Amino acid sequence: MATTIDHLRVDHRITVLRDFVDARGTFMRVGDTGVLTKLDLDQVRMKITLEIKRDSGKVRLVFDVGAKTGPRNGRMRDYFEIGEDVSPPRLLPVNRDRSKREMIVPPPGKTPEPMNNSEWARVVQTTDGPDRLESMEAELLRKYDHIGVAASIAEMYAERMRAFQRAGNEPRAIAAFKLAVGWMETYAGWATSGGEGAALSYESDQFRSALAQEFGYDPTQDP
């Protein structure tokens, strides 16, 4: 999984709904389409980066978090329609006994690169500090007054889960898993209409299912 901003997720096809120009002058037209291959929120530079793979090649878009017009946090739905999931199939360990509740510990050498170089990324990918990063939650909620911030906090705890998985610390990985799922449920609960609620609830369920597959089992479910 990658960072979530509003309804956007990597490995999904997206289509431009309105003409716009990004912070670097790249012009996108209504109907432009492609697969979102990268989605990043840099808390230091206050930039959002999208990379879209199109038939004509890859395009990289950059947006200021504090922008008052155009695509930005809380307004991505106005400019992008999300379509089919084109994620590559996940490869599960051969002959794994799925009845066993065992956390998957990534083998040595499989540690992913940091999401970005921001302090936010460094903190959530370490095993220091308490299970719940309340000060970071409060800071994100203060800066971004829209429902998408709940999904971003969920991704923050998903990264913490992965850090504890790599360290082999199952109890703390479970705590991070539960916080991630809880914030995605909050994200769905902040919907402002029935249709949006149904869509966000589905997104929350998909998030939980993918996280459980990555973890090895769902620690919120009884054995």
Image (cartoon, helix red, strand yellow):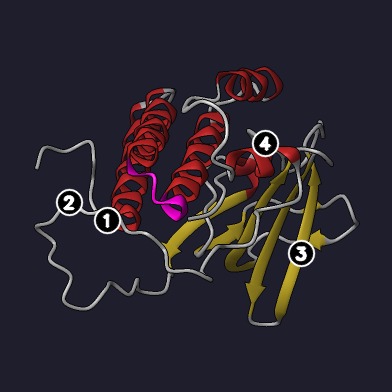
Q: Secondary structure at mark 4?
A: loop
Pointers 4 and 3 in contact (CB under 8 A)?
no
The Cα–Cα distance between marks 3 and 2, rounded to whole angstroms, is 41 Å
Q: Mark 1 or 4, which is nearer the eye? A: 1
The Cα–Cα distance between marks 4 and 3, rounded to whole angstroms, is 17 Å
Q: Which residue is mark 2?
A: 101
Answer few, some or many: residues within 10 Å of disc 3's Cα (few below 14, many 20 plus, some between 14 and 19): some
- Please name the residue shown 22% across and 36% down the image: 220
Residue at the farthest bottom position: 56
The Cα–Cα distance between marks 2 and 4, rounded to whole angstroms, is 38 Å
Q: Which residue is mark 4?
A: 73
Residue extent of the magenta highlight: 165-170
> Between disc 1 and disc 4, whose residue precedes?
4
Q: Secondary structure at mark 2?
A: loop
In the rendering, at what x and y percent does residue 40 appear? 67, 51
Q: Mark 1 or 3, which is nearer the eye? A: 1
